[in-house]
Image (cartoon, rainbow, N blue to C red):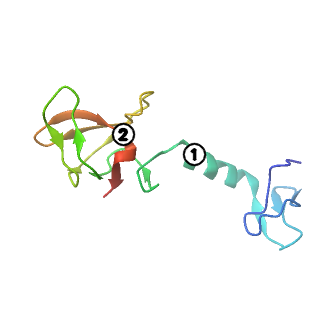
């Protein structure tokens, strides 16, 4: 039995496994542990915007503040809508690849955008 499994309804630590289901003796709630584990991994693995919404390839986002472009005098204004983003795995935090009208291709950090 896994010590970390808690009831999603009442957060009780006394849940036990009965074949394929987990059962909470305090509130009587039953759930599938495998389905919860898959859902938790999918949520943890995703890229999230400034409000915590999960982003996906092809989404549209809105820049939430003015962003200076490194090596240029241009600025991406807050409120700029960016369409058809592509998510990428970047160690420097720039996890969105996109094209912005009037500026061109660039990478953005997901903490400076919100889902449109």
State the residue at coordinates (13%, 36%).
74
Q: Is residue 2 above or below residue 28?
A: above
In screen coordinates, is 11 left or right of 48? right
The residue tagged with tag 1: helix, strand or loop? helix
**Nearer to us: label 1 or label 2:** 2
The quarter of the picture where the C terminus appears is bottom left
The front one of 8 and 63 is: 63
State the residue at coordinates (44%, 55%).
53
Can you tell which mark lies on residue 36?
A: none
Q: Is residue 61 above or below residue 11?
A: above
Percent position (x, y) of residue 76? 19, 43
The residue furthest left is 102
> In this figure, what is the number of numbered marks?
2
Label 1 packing within 10 angstroms: few (<14), some (14-19), many (20+): few
Percent position (x, y) of residue 109? 36, 39
State the residue at coordinates (37%, 34%).
94
Measure the alpha-carbon separation of dots 1 and 2.
Answer: 17 Å
The front one of 49 and 28 is: 49
- Which of the 4 image quadrants contains residue 24? bottom right
The residue tagged with tag 2: helix, strand or loop? loop
Can you tell which mark lies on residue 44?
A: 1
The front one of 25 and 11 is: 11
Closer to the N terminus: mark 1 or mark 2? 1
Q: Are marks 1 and 2 in contact (CB under 8 Å)?
A: no
Question: Which residue is label 2 attached to?
Answer: 109
The front one of 113 and 105 is: 113
State the residue at coordinates (72%, 51%).
34
- Which of the 4 image quadrants contains residue 110? top left
Label 2 packing within 10 angstroms: few (<14), some (14-19), many (20+): some
The residue furthest bottom is 27
């Amino acid at each position: 039995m896994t010590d970390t499994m808690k009831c999603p309804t009442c957060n009780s630590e006394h849940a036990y496994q009965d074949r394929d289901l987990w059962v909470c003796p305090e509130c009587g709630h039953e759930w599938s542990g495998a389905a919860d584990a898959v859902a938790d991994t999918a949520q943890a693995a995703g890229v999230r915007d400034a409000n915590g919404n999960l982003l996906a390839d092809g989404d549209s986002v809105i820049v939430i503040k003015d962003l200076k472009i490194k090596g240029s005098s241009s600025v991406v204004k807050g409120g700029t809508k960016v369409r058809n983003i592509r998510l990428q795995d970047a160690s420097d935090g720039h996890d969105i690849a996109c094209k912005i009208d009037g500026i061109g291709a660039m990478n953005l950090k997901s903490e400076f955008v919100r889902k449109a």
